[in-house]
Image (cartoon, helix red, strand yellow):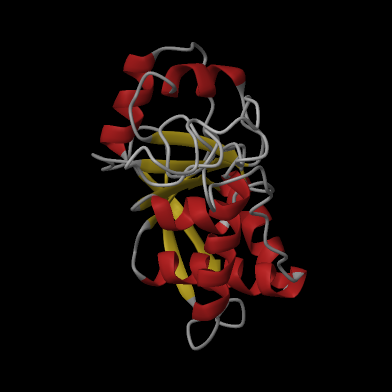
Amino acid sequence: MSTLKVYDMKGVAVGDCEIADGLMLLDRGSQAVRDTVVAYLAGLRRGTASTLRKGEVAGSNKKPWKQKGTGRARAGYRQSPIWRGGGVAFGPHPRSFAKKLNKKVGRLAFRRAFSEKVAAGEVRVVDTLDMEEAKTKAFAALMKAMGVGGPALFVVDKVERNVVQASRNIGNVEVVRASDVNVYQLLRYPTVVVNRAGLEQMKARMESH
């Protein structure tokens, strides 16, 4: 059983929370993590790059010069890919980069990714994450109290407006709901700060796997 210290917003320990060994998964799922991240990043690609084939370049079919007698190579049309301003051979065209991912694979990847974070001591639990004012200074003080000095992912049960506004001026910090956090986000940030209610939602997602 993994035990995590719970702190208040001033960095004072106020209790413990536990994650059952049955939820932790460290002996399999690494390939699922890789496949999930690859599929996620592929899905972010817009796939809008487009080039013109030789048949799509504007121009007539008139020969640039006569076939023989000029001393130059034969040329049939100015839209040829070997000419500047001509078509592009094998160039990119609009397409979807989306990859199909089995739901069970996605669930397995989430469980493995979060288990690794917990096992590595990269998950910190805060009792509540409520801010009376949307002040960057207050959020920076919270990070300092939690011992977070670099990029961090803040996972909450529900996203409060003040929390989002207070954190958005701090680089490499992201606030996300526990129900929406994905494998890529867990791997991207070296530290995950989750409030107690958010952790319960994360555990529920692990149990459903």
Relative vertical location of residue 75 with respect to residue 34 in this rendering, above or below: above
Pick whichever, 191 or 171, lies toward us: 171
Between 42 and 188, which is closer to the camera in this rendering? 42
| Residue at figure coordinates x 34%, y 68% from the top left | 120
User: Is residue 1 in sight in this rendering?
Assistant: yes
Q: Judge by depth and name the residue closer to the eye, 119 or 77.
A: 77
Where residue 141 sits in the image (x, y, percent)?
30, 25
Asked whether 13 or 120 is in front, the reply is 120
Residue 192 is left or right of residue 129, and the answer is: left
- Quarter of the image holding residue 142? top left
Is residue 24 in view?
no
Q: Position of residue 21 (x, y in %)?
A: 55, 81
- Locate residue 12 relative to residue 85 in the image: left or right: left
| Residue for point 43% across, 62% down | 4
> In the displayed structure, would residue 74 be above or below residue 121?
above
The total number of labels drawn is 0
Above or below, 85 relative to 81 = above
- Which residue is at a point 68% across and 48% down the rendered structure image? 95
Seen from this angle, which residue lies furthest front? Answer: 69
Q: Is residue 203 left or right of residue 82?
A: right
Find residue 96 and report its horizontal and vertical position in percent.
Answer: 69, 50
Residue 9 image position (x, y, % from top left)? 41, 33
Asked which quadrant contains residue 187, the reply is bottom left
Q: Quadrant of the C terminus?
A: bottom right
